[in-house]
Image (tube, coloured by chain):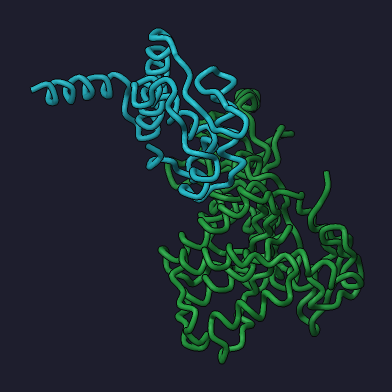
Chain colours: A green, B cyan
Amino acid sequence: MSYAIETQELQYRAGRTFELGPLNLHVPAGAIYGFLGPNGSGKTTTIRLCLGLLRAERGGVRVLGHDVPSQAPAMFARVGYVPERSHLYPNLTVREALALHGAFHRRWDHQAAAELLGTFQLQGDTRIGRLSKGENGKLLMLLALAQRPDLLVLDEPTDGLDPVVRRDVLMALIDFVSESGATVFISSHLVHELERICDWVGVMDRGRLVAEVPMHSFKNGIKRLRVRNAPAQAGDPPFVLLARERGDGASGTEVWVVRGWQATMRQYFEGIGAVLQDVVDLDLEEGFVELLRTARVPRGS
Amino acid sequence: MFDEIDPRNPIPLYDQIAARIRLAVASGDLAEGDALPSVRQLAARLRINPATVVQAYRALEREGFVEMRQGSGTYVRSVSTDRRRQTREDQAARLARDLLTEAARLGIAGTEVARALQREMGARAQ
């Protein structure tokens, strides 16, 4: 498989308290990759390291086959980036910002830029400092899309925007991806939004990548089981037992959080003399919460 | 037609889309020769990964419900009356299974559900 973004043992430190890595990230070419993690888990830092905007302490980064930071200019010609905070000059008008960005990008598509201006209902003569938050978000996405990139790196592109603006921005993004086949690396707290569009998920926690899997296996792999009469010593289960807790129903009922569940594993419970009452599917958000919770708490406590 | 697509549902999105189209064909909402929305249109409208739409259309093509014509689009094929009836029956069976599973979860017996279903049908017939 070829990767649009690949890091090897990437490490970074900020002050005494924040340490990132060693990080081995693999974003498959052509994927829409959702980058999840709680606040402060290192998502933005990772993105900035991948784009050469921060200098790593150790390890390597390759983006679209270019070594970062040594080949960063060649890489940047092919990457559209929407940063967490707007980096645009507030005194420029929207039209001037388009002209400025267009001048830097060889593949700039004037026609696409004009169309998106209409789609997003942005006025060319408005000063950027006077744009609303939603308009600013749309402008950032427009600039990233109009450069026709091979890779889009989006750091919380829709967080804090209203639902109508979010829908417009995502529709424009998907339209571009359908047409171009570009890779998308997107970080967000809006888990349900990522659930719709992503086919890969990476989960960060405390500077480490705790999971990196295709979306369907992430969603199918983690289940909550309701189990009755399980012995204290559960033997050797065929799945990964992430947590085992007392249930809120009748006594003797427990909730097991497991990874790698398959329907054929029901037999295991008969073998240990327990009753499997229910298998609850988790959506991406619940799976994400369970993964973080169980990653932090030692098993069985 | 795609309003009830739910990304939080454990059934994969492509499967939900395919099921919706299968039923539309079975119920006659889509007729032979009708064009499905383009991958680009449907992905943007549902705000989902274009690859998911392609996956759904490919599954429907394998089953013989649609035909993907290179560079033109995806079109509904002729589907026999028997096959259409079977598709509706399969979907009805699936709904019944889901209902019984949900009832069991809440501690309601299958016979109680069946009685309630009869009553509701009676109420609607009036």
Where residue A152 sits, quadrant-wise, is: bottom right
Residue A237 lies, in percent from the top left, at: 70, 34
Please give left or right for residue A60 compared with residue A79 in the image: right
- Image point 68% across, 44% down: which residue? A214
- Image point 60% across, 55% down: which residue? A176
B95 in relation to B87, above or below: below
Q: Residue furthest front?
A: A111
Q: Residue furthest bottom?
A: A91
Residue B50 lies, in percent from the top left, at: 59, 44
Residue nearest the viewer, comparing A126 with A199: A126
Q: Residue furthest top?
A: B82
Please give left or right for residue A16 compared with residue A155 in the image: right
A41 in relation to B69, above or below: below
Residue nearest the viewer, comparing B44 with A186: B44
Tell me if I can see residue A154 in this picture.
Answer: no
Where residue A73 sits, quadrant-wise, is: bottom right
Please give left or right for residue B117 compared with residue A164 in the image: left
Residue B126 lies, in percent from the top left, at: 7, 23
Quadrant where the N terminus of chain B is found in the figure: top left
Tell me if I can see residue A255 in this picture.
Answer: yes
- Image point 55% across, 18% down: which residue? B63
Residue nearest the viewer, comparing B40 with A31: B40
Residue A271 lies, in percent from the top left, at: 65, 23
Residue nearest the viewer, comparing B100 with B107: B100
Number of numbered discs visible in the structure rendering: 0
Q: Residue furthest left?
A: B126
- Image point 42% across, 20% down: which residue? B32
